[in-house]
Image: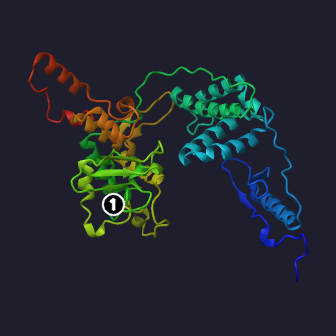
């Protein structure tokens, strides 16, 4: 049957789908070729039946050639609905950021929304509401443990909220830049954990089989050794490959020292970078026979093996791997931060990041120049490395000072394992 003039073919209809944003009403989404962007229509509830009904209505309108418009007109300015602002902020700004950064920002905005319940963008930006938000966050509102939060934690939360409102200000949607409430924070140590010792690392290796099961133990021990020797972050180690495109790749060239080639996509600063391949990490890599050097280098096995089950995914996700390593640290009873009775935060046990800290500390203890350590850790300044990863050993520094000024060659007391116990 011939198509009548002006009649749309069914294949020309935009594909309509249902989306479920976290902690927000369901949405109907489709791409509008006329506007060249994705259109999002709020269902107004989290009821899937309502979403299916609206989806069918929109598809029917497309079939009949009727233009689909959201019932709510987008108002740009202080009177803009808060949910509409959230949509604009997510699609125009957060979508361009790294997944983890965007996820953290969305989570903090969700918490602020539940506490303040603003109807408009302008309402959230009111100084009184920002002050109330800060006070409620400090008191522990919407916290998992229903305990007060530390001032450092709340400062981070408020920074995310004010950052979103500042973005709105630069879009000319707010008349005044948001006024940030002052919050007094103590000058505490920057690290949330600490470097662990060789004895503690051995205890983690010993506890591995208890957590992951005998069959998976060797793959997890190899992964722990990789973190211990490489100074890489957990998601970076998961992306070390012998030959993968866009992955972190070790490289050996005749007449040159080996390096680790890190692509921009794996970097916080979005820059391609080469760093020296640490000797201990190189030794670990070379344990793999040459004829097997292809694909991913580190493959921690699924824990489902110990229960006789079949792995659901071909490869584990780095966030989940981190949780398993933290469980290993807890099983080994390696406490890196004590319980905070004021905020209710429990004691923190050794994690993957503490193994990265340990590598940085060992480099410093070995006398590696600060700028070289900074290069290996990929920090923009030595101060960042020193505060967060290689704080040093006060006893070692006191010994160096005494030897330098007084020529004292006497070894320090109990020197048998002091370097290790102090964070080596």
Residue 334 visible here: no
Quadrant of the rendered image containing residue 114: top right
Residue identified by numbered label 1: 219
Near mark 1 (Cα within 10 A), the count class, few <14, some 14-19 or many ≥20, is some
Residue 417 percent location from the top left of the image: 17, 36
Going by the image, does 172 lie left or right of 72? left
Depth order, front residue of 298/92:
92
- State whether residue 212 is above or below residue 99: below
Going by the image, does 23 lie left or right of 380? right
- State whether residue 81 is above or below residue 139: below
Depth order, front residue of 63/400:
63
Going by the image, does 83 lie left or right of 333? right
Q: Quadrant of the C terminus?
A: top left
Quadrant of the rendered image containing residue 92: top right
Going by the image, does 119 lie left or right of 346? right
Residue 212 percent location from the top left of the image: 37, 58
- Residue placed at 21% from the left, 53% from the top? 255
Q: Secondary structure at mark 1?
A: helix
Q: Farthest residue in the top direction?
A: 406
- Residue placed at 88% from the left, 71% from the top? 7
Quadrant of the rendered image containing residue 254: bottom left
Residue 309 visible here: yes
Residue 243 percent location from the top left of the image: 37, 62
């Amino acid at each position: 049957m011939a198509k009548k003039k002006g009649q749309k073919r069914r294949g020309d209809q935009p594909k309509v789908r249902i989306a479920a944003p976290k902690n927000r009403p369901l949405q109907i989404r489709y791409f509008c070729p006329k506007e060249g962007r994705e259109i999002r229509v709020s269902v107004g509830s989290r009821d899937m039946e309502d979403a299916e009904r609206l989806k069918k209505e929109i598809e029917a309108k497309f079939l009949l050639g009727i233009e689909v418009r959201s019932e709510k007109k987008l108002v740009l300015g202080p009177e803009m609905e808060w949910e509409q602002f959230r949509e604009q902020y997510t699609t125009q700004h957060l979508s361009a950021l790294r997944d983890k950064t965007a996820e953290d920002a969305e989570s903090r905005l969700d918490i602020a929304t539940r506490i303040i319940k603003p109807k408009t963008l302008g309402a959230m930006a009111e100084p009184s509401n920002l002050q109330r938000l800060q006070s409620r966050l400090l008191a522990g509102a919407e916290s998992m443990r229903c305990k007060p939060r530390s001032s450092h934690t709340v400062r981070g939360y408020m920074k995310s909220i004010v950052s979103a409102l500042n973005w709105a200000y630069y879009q000319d949607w707010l008349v005044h830049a948001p006024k940030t409430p002052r919050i007094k924070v103590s000058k505490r140590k920057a690290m949330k954990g600490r470097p662990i010792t060789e004895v503690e690392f051995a205890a983690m290796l010993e506890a591995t089989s208890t957590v992951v099961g005998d069959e998976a133990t060797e793959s997890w021990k190899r992964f722990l050794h990789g973190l211990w020797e490489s100074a890489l972050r957990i998601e970076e180690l998961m992306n070390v490959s012998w030959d993968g495109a866009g992955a972190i790749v070790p490289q050996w060239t005749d007449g040159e020292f080996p390096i680790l080639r890190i692509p921009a996509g794996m970097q916080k600063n979005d820059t391609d970078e080469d760093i020296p391949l640490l000797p201990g990490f190189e030794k670990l890599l070379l344990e793999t026979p040459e004829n097997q050097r292809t694909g991913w280098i580190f493959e921690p096995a699924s824990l489902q093996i110990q229960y006789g089950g079949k792995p659901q995914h071909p490869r584990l996700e780095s966030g989940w791997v981190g949780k398993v390593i933290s469980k290993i640290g807890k099983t080994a009873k390696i406490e890196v931060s004590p319980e905070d009775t004021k905020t209710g935060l429990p004691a923190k046990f050794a994690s993957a990041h503490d193994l990265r800290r340990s590598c940085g500390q060992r480099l410093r203890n070995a006398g590696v120049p600060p700028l070289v350590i900074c290069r290996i850790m990929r920090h923009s300044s030595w101060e960042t490395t020193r505060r967060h990863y290689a704080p040093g050993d006060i006893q070692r520094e006191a010994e160096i000072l005494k030897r330098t000024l007084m020529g004292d060659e006497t070894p320090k007391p109990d020197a048998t394992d002091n370097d290790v116990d102090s964070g080596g």
